[in-house]
Image: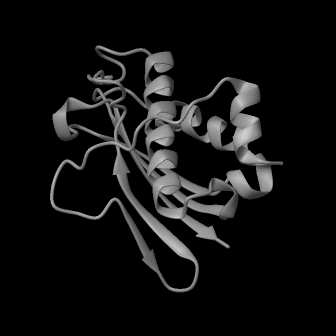
Amino acid sequence: MDVYAKMKELGITLPTPPAKGGLYTPVMEFGEHFLYCSGCGPQQNGTSIEGKLGKELTLEQGQEAARRCMLNLLANLNAKLGDLNRIKRFVKVLAFVNSADDFAQQPQVVNGGSQLLLDLFGEERGLPARTAIGVNATPGNIAVEIEVLVEYE
């Protein structure tokens, strides 16, 4: 199915690709038909989701943060590829969740981003290998940061 038709059906609009927060490349091509995407946070339209999961933020707020991260990654991929339908599959997701010491639901938080990929690309293309890690600090105190590796055609 066409990814853009699915976004329209679900009422999803890609945000503007996020501004870089340092000296790096948002999307790096390597090998034959692979793209590595630098980590994106949940900043969109001048707002962000900040704080620690299990302290200032609920699981649901963390899931929304992860969803926003994934939308930002898709915006960067769209800018690089010109067409998200060229994505053959998502290979790997690595997520960092800003967590209180006793918070242990990082995988459930990252499901917010994974669900978006599943909804847009289906199971075969959209569900990659994944790691969800709890960390004690993130840049700007953002709730979640996610990076992805994709194969494209």
Residue at the extreme front: 82
Image coords of residue 2 (percent x, y): 78, 48
Nearer to me, 7 or 125: 7
Q: Position of residue 18 (x, y in %)?
A: 33, 42
Quarter of the figure with residue 22: bottom left
- Locate residue 41 relative to residue 148 in the image: left or right: left
Foreground of the two, 135 or 40: 40
| Residue at image point 44% right, 41% down | 72
Q: Can residue 105 be seen in this view?
A: no
Provide residue 24's location: percent of width, then percent of height.
23, 63
Instruction: Give the residue furthest to the bottom.
Output: 31
Q: Residue at x 44, y 52 (%)?
A: 76
Residue 149 relative to residue 118: left or right: left
| Tag count | 0
| Picture coordinates of residue 47, whole percent (x, y) | 30, 21
- Quadrant where the C terminus sits is bottom right
Residue at (55%, 37%) from the top-left corner?
113
